[in-house]
Image (cartoon, rainbow, N blue to C red):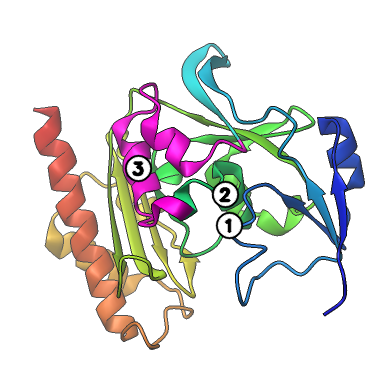
Amino acid sequence: MAEKEFIVAKSIPIAARLKDGKSAFLAGGTEINRLGSSVDASKLISIGRLGLDTINEAEVDGVSCLRIGATATFQECVENPKVPGWFRQACLFMSSRIKRNMATIGGNVALARDDSYLIPSLVASGSLVEFSNGRILSVAKYVKDHHRYTDRLIVAIYIDPQVRVEAKRFSNTAAGHAYVTVAVSSNGDVAAQIKGAGLLDTSVISNSLDRSEKFCLKWIKNLRNPKVRNDMYGSSAYKRYLTGVTVATLSEKIREASK
């Protein structure tokens, strides 16, 4: 294995400038250092000393929100009283505390994996991602156009602490990859992710007032996504069924909580 070049970035602009197609940002290192990592880079740019781990109240376009620095760890978010319960729940989907102490929020979002712990809840809640150049866009758009932003440095995630999110993650073991993750917010938005297929098009169900199990199963059955395949996690039909039923169940929980 070729030896990798390691650079400790001294500032955010320097880190952003160093990034190219042969490099990767390094924070917690839980993805880069794992066996079978999806990251292939000859140069690692450490961003751990850039002060990107703060969690504080902020505003975006006059709307109050919580700004979570990209290098804040999962465990730091779990323990921070400012962080809303739904986001702590998403962080706790990562069952290993040792891993939560290392894995960073920005790193998990940046990878845009289809078994992400955080992305479904962030998308359903309308959360935002901020880059080092000051640009802010929705997490949903970032994931959809992920290939366009691979050389961008994520510096923070913005979440709405007032929104309520219910989420459910399905995996064969607590530490295993999720094959279905669903999130529903009090804003009415739905996010659903299936391993191998990524985020599903939930526009129809998000815009519908009917969240009955019958309607949700009809929606997922008619959804055209050939990437939902039979695999070691189950058949395409099973994963679609599980997704539809879970959307209906979580939507009902949101309705009951709002009464």
- Residues shaded magenta: 70-98
Q: Between tags 3 and 2, which lies in front?
A: 2
Q: Residue type at mark 1?
A: Ala
Q: Kindly identify which residue carries mark 2.
A: 109
Q: CA distance from mark 3 to mark 2?
A: 19 Å
Q: Kindly identify which residue carries mark 3.
A: 189
Look at 81% across and 65% down and name the residue there. 41
| Rendering quarter of residue 153 | top right
Look at 90% across and 36% down and name the residue there. 14
Give above or below for 30 relative to 8: below
Residue 231 in magenta stretch: no
- In this view, which residue lies farthest toward the top? 62
Q: Position of residue 1 (x, y in %)?
A: 82, 80
Q: Which circle's residue, 3 or 2, is located before the other in the chain? A: 2
Q: Position of residue 210 (x, y in %)?
A: 18, 49
Numbered badge on residue 112: 1
Q: Residue type at mark 2?
A: Val
Asked whether residue 218 is in view, the answer is: no
Figure quadrant of the C terminus: top left
Relative to 244, is 54 on the left or the right? right
Q: CA distance from mark 2 to mark 1?
A: 5 Å
